[in-house]
Image (cartoon, rainbow, N blue to C red):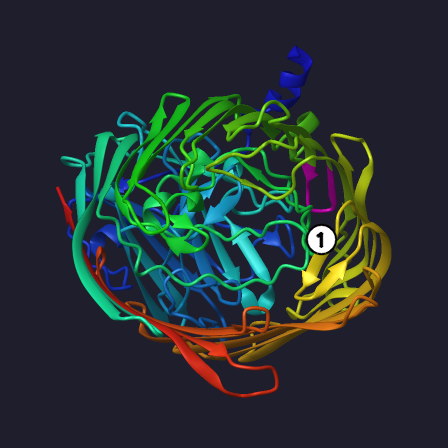
């Protein structure tokens, strides 16, 4: 055991870690995108950035100056991004938490606990977009979380300037912590160039917090009383076809209190999620459950503390997931039942860190409704961090969303991770977990446990997973895709970066094999072999994601499966070989597109699947994206077509005023839905939301008529008081 720990601690502190100071100022800073105050002029530059790609380790093609200031209330970050071709700077969106992957951008990590695992994330582009999120598990990012902060940008003849002001009240940190982890990245998208201040290695993506540098001279920071009150007023109107119209209004609040600077108590009363963006619709042609992401603000606070290592290592890009996720706790099980909202009366959450121990405690009370009686839910999570990136943890949940049912889940997980594997600059991760559920009348066979090893590096990417999920394992507040299965998965990717070959940036090649056996009988249930011989990404931004991927699979049905209405596959064995080709044009252009075509065997017959998308941008005011996903299946049991169409239109007048529209249709439910969502930010922490939802039902196949199913409208005004 000592030898294993040595592998993960051999270089717990990198000898080349960068260090910079933060300059204290008493001069008022006017946030306007002009670094012209004396404090900015006199503050030292933290040092040059270094290219991560394409020319790893070299000086960037364009110079970037970064300066850090602080006063009693704010951390200020000033960035001057020089550009010799300022007219070619790309900033296509002003959407809050919009995707900046097609833009020039500045990204910032603040590891306020200096624990090398978690961080606050802030980013902007030359159009002044606000993007923030939480980084957890040393590389995963959730941008559905929103903080109160400010940024202003200014374009100049020499490039562009970004001026950030991040309130200390918006962050959690140890009161006596003089050092924070810090990193900053600049992307020049037209050159496919990324430069970082610290950890500029191909094996270390920017979100890998363990490779961040350090900033000091922060001193003892104050959060004042440490109390925020977010107060809201909401009104709703609902018109269900064939039923009476209904409307109501409500008041409520979310309260955030820093028990200590590193331990926060969050309370919610009469919780309202009327402003939440609609889910992107999915159609399921498998026998296993689909997962929808959490988007509700209350549950996203401190989301990283409640994560659990029971999910698979992420495969490299372009490789499908194993479809065997296990989440002991999945927050969408609280306040939502079969996709319908269950009113939340109130809730409390205590989350934070004490020393090297992270704790999370969540309690929620839902009200009586036509779907379920009033209920209480409890979730407890604790992690003991050790070495540089490793931890051992435990989780406990109590409560079930199902009417008349109860349930408990408890388990442990461990993560051993390093970015200096065998004293080299390579990443290596070992995960293990064991969880048991108690629900219903189940007696035994109610465990899930597994081990995984992952070597996620730029040129070579390896993984191996073994997992067992027993027949009666059913975490009442969790999510499980497959039960009564034992999974084995192994994968390898070889991804070289050739010099001066056809304008290529990187070539991806991979082979992944996944096998499922039944736990009760040991019989083979399915296997899948995915071979990706060609996945080429060009420096222009264009990609051949798949020239001719090969997907060979085996499925055994132990009972009939209705894959489509009226199309029932009998029990038996099914073997198939399918092929995939996929192309995508560079997203830096005003008009970009992607096209995917998959064909070959499909269960007892054959099928073609065509997926196409097109995006048009009128920077930075408008973005339109249309998508179509269609499957044409022909089988002895019956032919069918699955069609999913969607369109998104975002119109931004400023970074503070955005109108988002989403239209979706699928021929399985025959439902056409439109959501229009207006968000107006009067100032950080004060927002107005107007949301309108309209649904229609397609009367008959071949008929263009739709009848109205429902209409919903809501308005919400919220403001934050800080003490």
Q: Which residue is the site of mark 1?
A: 319
Of 436 and 18, nearer the camera is 436
Of 594 and 244, nearer the camera is 244
Please provide the residue range marked out in magenta: 455-463
Disc 1 packing (10 Å; few <14; some 14–19; many ≥20): some
Q: In the rendered image of this protein, does residue 277 appear above or below residue 348?
A: below
Quarter the C terminus occupies: top left
Q: Position of residue 401 (x, y in %)?
A: 41, 41
- Residue 532 sits inside the magenta stretch: no
Report the magenta stretch's main SS: strand
Q: In the rendered image of this protein, does residue 239 appear above or below residue 65?
A: below
Query: Which residue is at 66% across, 66% downward?
Result: 565
Q: Position of residue 427 (x, y in %)?
A: 65, 35
Q: Position of residue 266 (x, y in %)?
A: 26, 38
651 vs 185, left or right, is left
Query: Which residue is at 77% across, 70% downward?
Result: 638
- Residue 461 sits inside the magenta stretch: yes
353 vs 107, left or right, is left
């Amino acid at each position: 055991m000592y030898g294993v720990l040595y592998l993960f601690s051999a270089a717990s502190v990198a000898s080349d870690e960068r260090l910079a100071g933060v300059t204290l100022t008493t001069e008022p800073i006017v946030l306007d995108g002009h670094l012209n105050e004396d404090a900015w002029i006199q503050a030292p530059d933290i040092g040059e950035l270094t290219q991560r790609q394409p020319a790893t380790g070299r000086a960037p093609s364009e110079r970037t100056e970064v300066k850090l200031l602080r006063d009693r209330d704010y951390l200020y970050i000033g960035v001057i991004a020089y550009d010799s071709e300022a007219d070619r700077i790309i900033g296509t969106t002003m959407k809050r938490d919009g995707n900046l992957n097609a833009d020039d951008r500045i990204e910032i990590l603040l590891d306020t606990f200096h624990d090398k695992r978690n961080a606050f994330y802030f980013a902007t582009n030359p159009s002044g977009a606000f993007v923030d999120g939480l980084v957890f598990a040393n590389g995963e990012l959730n941008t559905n979380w929103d903080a109160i902060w400010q940024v202003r940008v200014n374009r100049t003849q020499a490039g562009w300037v970004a001026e950030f002001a991040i309130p200390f009240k918006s962050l959690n940190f140890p009161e006596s912590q003089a050092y924070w982890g810090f990193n900053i990245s600049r992307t020049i998208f037209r050159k496919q160039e990324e430069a970082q201040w610290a950890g500029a290695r191909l094996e270390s993506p920017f979100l890998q917090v363990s490779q961040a540098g350090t900033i000091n001279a922060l001193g003892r920071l104050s959060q004042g009383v440490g109390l925020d009150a977010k107060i809201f007023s909401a009104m709703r109107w609902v018109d269900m076809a064939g039923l009476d119209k209904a409307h109501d209004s409500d008041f409520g609040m979310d309260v955030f209190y820093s028990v200590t600077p590193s331990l926060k108590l969050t309370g919610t009363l009469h919780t309202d999620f009327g402003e939440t963006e609609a889910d992107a619709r999915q159609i399921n042609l498998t026998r296993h459950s689909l997962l929808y992401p959490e988007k509700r603000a209350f549950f996203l606070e401190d989301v990283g503390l409640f994560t659990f290592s029971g999910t698979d290592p992420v495969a490299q890009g372009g490789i499908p997931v194993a479809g065997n996720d296990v989440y002991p706790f999945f927050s969408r099980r609280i306040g939502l039942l079969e996709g319908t909202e269950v009113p939340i009366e109130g809730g409390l959450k205590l989350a934070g860190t004490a020393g090297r121990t992270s704790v999370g405690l969540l309690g929620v009370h839902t009200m009586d409704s036509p779907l379920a009686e009033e209920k209480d839910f409890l979730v407890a999570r604790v992690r003991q961090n050790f070495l540089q990136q490793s931890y051992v943890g435990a989780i406990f949940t109590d409560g079930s969303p199902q009417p008349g049912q109860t349930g408990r889940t408890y388990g442990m997980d461990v993560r051993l991770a390093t970015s200096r594997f065998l004293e080299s600059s390579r990443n290596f991760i070992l995960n293990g977990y064991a969880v048991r559920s108690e629900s219903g009348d189940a007696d035994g066979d109610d465990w899930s446990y597994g081990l995984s090893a992952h070597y996620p590096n730029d040129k070579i990417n390896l993984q191996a997973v073994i997992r067992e999920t027993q027949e009666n394992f059913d975490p009442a507040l969790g999510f499980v895709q497959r039960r009564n299965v034992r999974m084995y998965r192994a994968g390898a990717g070889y991804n070289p970066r050739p010099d001066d070959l056809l304008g290529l940036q990187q070539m991806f090649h991979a082979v992944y094999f996944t096998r499922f056996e039944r736990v009760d009988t040991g019989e083979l249930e399915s296997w899948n072999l995915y071979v990706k011989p060609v996945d080429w990404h060009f420096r222009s931004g264009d990609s051949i994601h798949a020239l001719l991927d090969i997907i060979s699979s085996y499925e055994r049905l132990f009972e009939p499966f209705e894959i489509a209405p009226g199309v029932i596959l009998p029990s038996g064995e099914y073997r198939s070989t399918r092929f995939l080709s996929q192309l995508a044009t560079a997203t830096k252009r005003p008009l970009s597109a992607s096209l995917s075509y998959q064909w070959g065997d499909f269960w007892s017959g054959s099928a073609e699947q065509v997926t196409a998308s097109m995006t048009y941008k009128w920077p930075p005011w408008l973005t339109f994206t249309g998508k179509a996903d269609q499957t044409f299946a022909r089988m002895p049991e019956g032919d069918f077509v699955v069609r999913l169409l969607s369109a998104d239109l975002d119109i931004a007048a400023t970074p503070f005023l955005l109108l988002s529209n989403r239209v979706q249709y699928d021929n399985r439910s025959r439902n056409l839905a439109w959501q229009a969502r207006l968000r107006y930010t009067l100032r950080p922490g004060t927002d107005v939301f107007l949301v309108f939802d309209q649904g229609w039902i397609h009367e008959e196949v071949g008929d263009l008529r739709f009848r109205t199913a429902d209409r919903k409208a809501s308005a919400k005004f919220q403001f934050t008081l800080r003490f």
